[in-house]
Amino acid sequence: MSTLLHAIRMVEFTSVVTPPLARLWRAGLDTAPSADEQAWLSDDERARAQRFVFDRDRQRFLAAHCALRALLSRQTGLAPHAIRFSLGPYGKPFLVPAACSFNLSHSADVALMAVAREGELGIDVEMLRPMPDALELARHNYTSAERQELLDTPAAQRDLAFLYGWTRKEACLKAIGSGLSLPAQSVDAGLAPAPRIVPVDLGSTCISVLVQSFLLDQNIVGAVAKVLADPKEIP
């Protein structure tokens, strides 16, 4: 039995919206996956791992992707090595065949994974840390409303507020799967952790993304987002 199957522990997502966006799982990345677990990975995944300069980063990448395969094995009933991915036009992976939707994010030694039966998902995670360049990063990536929200936040809470905003925006962009084709400033996800429906103009159409934030262990900031087929389904 894979050690990773035991290492993944479910994080209950305490959403105030119905239905919940997704179910979330958390995996630690501080232990290297075994040779048998690494054998689950595709040639592409192993090639991407080899591009990392530092062994620690390579190990965490391998552990995150092995954990994802272990989780998707649970969801689909397929063996981890039998999980097959294809890529969207901007590189977002999806299952073939499409048994469920998912997304993965990792920061330092923590990976978070979101899974839902259907609907495009995005998840992002960051470790809470000092952000001395928060205002400068916000100037280039946040909307004017988000920048003002950050400026109005007391200095002692600004690092957390910035990372709430950053992860919310990243989760929305990952859910949309638009890659770098959509400027970060075109997504106004806000900095407050509460659920929010974010309209996103894609030029030919406008879609709605529901995003919500969470804080784990007081130092892990995350957000999960889902593209809504019909915004009216959310009260």
Image (cartoon, helix red, strand yellow):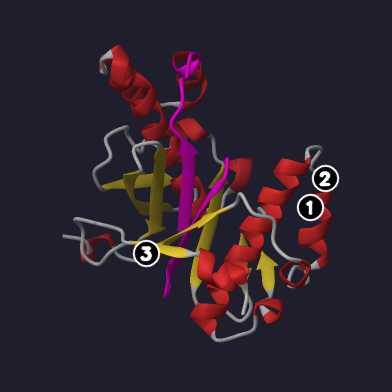
Indicate the secondary structure of the residue bearing disc 3.
loop
Is the C-beta separation of discs 3 and 2 under 8 Å?
no
Observer-nearest of 97 and 51: 51
| 50 to the left or right of 228 | right
The three-letter code of the residue at mark 1 reads Arg
| 88 to the left or right of 100 | right
Disc 1 and disc 3: Cα gap in Å?
27 Å
Magenta segment includes 97: no
Report which residue position mark 2 lands on: 51
Sequence-first tag of 3 and 2? 3
Sequence-first tag of 1 and 3? 3
- Which quadrant, please, contains the C terminus? bottom left
- Residue 15 is situated, as x and y percent measured from the top left of the image, at 24, 56
Residue 222, located in which quarter of the rendered image? top left
Task: Give the vertical position of 137 relative to 178 (above or below).
Answer: above
Residue at the spot 39% in from the left edge and 36% down from the top edge: 219
Is the C-beta separation of discs 2 and 1 under 8 Å?
yes
Observer-nearest of 2 and 115: 2
- Which quadrant, please, contains the N terminus? bottom right
| 138 to the left or right of 55 | left
- Residue 139 is situated, as x and y percent measured from the top left of the image, at 47, 17
Residue at the spot 50% in from the left edge and 64% down from the top edge: 8
Report which residue position mark 1 lands on: 48
Q: Which residue range is magenta in the image?
A: 108-134
